[in-house]
Amino acid sequence: MSDNQVTLVGNLTDDPELRYTPNGVAVAHFRLAVDQRVWDAGGWKEGEPSFFRINVWRDQAEHASKSLRKGARCVVVGRLKSRSWETPEGQRRSMVEIEADEVAASIRFAPVALDWQADEAALASGDDVGEDARRSTPSPDFDEVPF
């Protein structure tokens, strides 16, 4: 596991932008606004938000582009990555991005509906997208909570 792992919870500032590398690898980008809460004499207050560019790769990139929209609250677990470049005017620029290992919709403030039928259809067509979902779906004769 990476030694610079971060977990961020925030809201998407735009829809994920899905692209493909020349080799056909899917990559999605979106920005995440993370609010800071600060304590002062009057209690907790909202501080200045921080904005992070999130990069999601391969199947997860396609899933994020289908599942997430601007304003959605999500949880991102990933690694910090620093990138530098020079502008055409000769100015040196740099930014810190997050290479996402996991992206998930947050259910803290709103429910999220999973499309089990789409997962089953994908599995039936030979796509393994729904494999984990199918394994985690309780069988109809399951009458006890598993924990």
Image (tube, grey):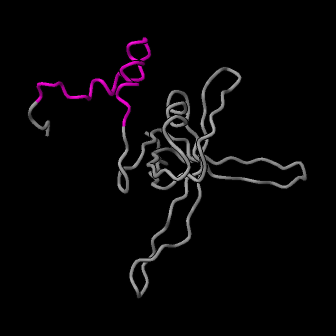
Question: Observer-nearest residue: 144 or 88?
Answer: 144
Q: Which image quarter is the C terminus in?
A: top left
Q: Is residue 122 magenta?
A: yes
Question: Observer-nearest residue: 98 or 146?
Answer: 146
Side of 129 relative to 19 (left or right): left
Percent position of residue 99, x then y = 55, 41
Q: Is residue 112 magenta?
A: no
Q: Which image quarter is the N terminus in?
A: top left
Question: Observer-nearest residue: 118 or 8?
Answer: 118
Q: Main secondary structure of the magenta part?
A: helix
On screen, residue 142 above or below 92: above
Percent position of residue 62, x then y = 54, 30
Magenta residue span: 114-142
Q: In this view, which residue lies farthest toward the left?
A: 143
On screen, residue 101 above or below 10: above
Q: In this view, which residue lies farthest toward the bottom?
A: 41
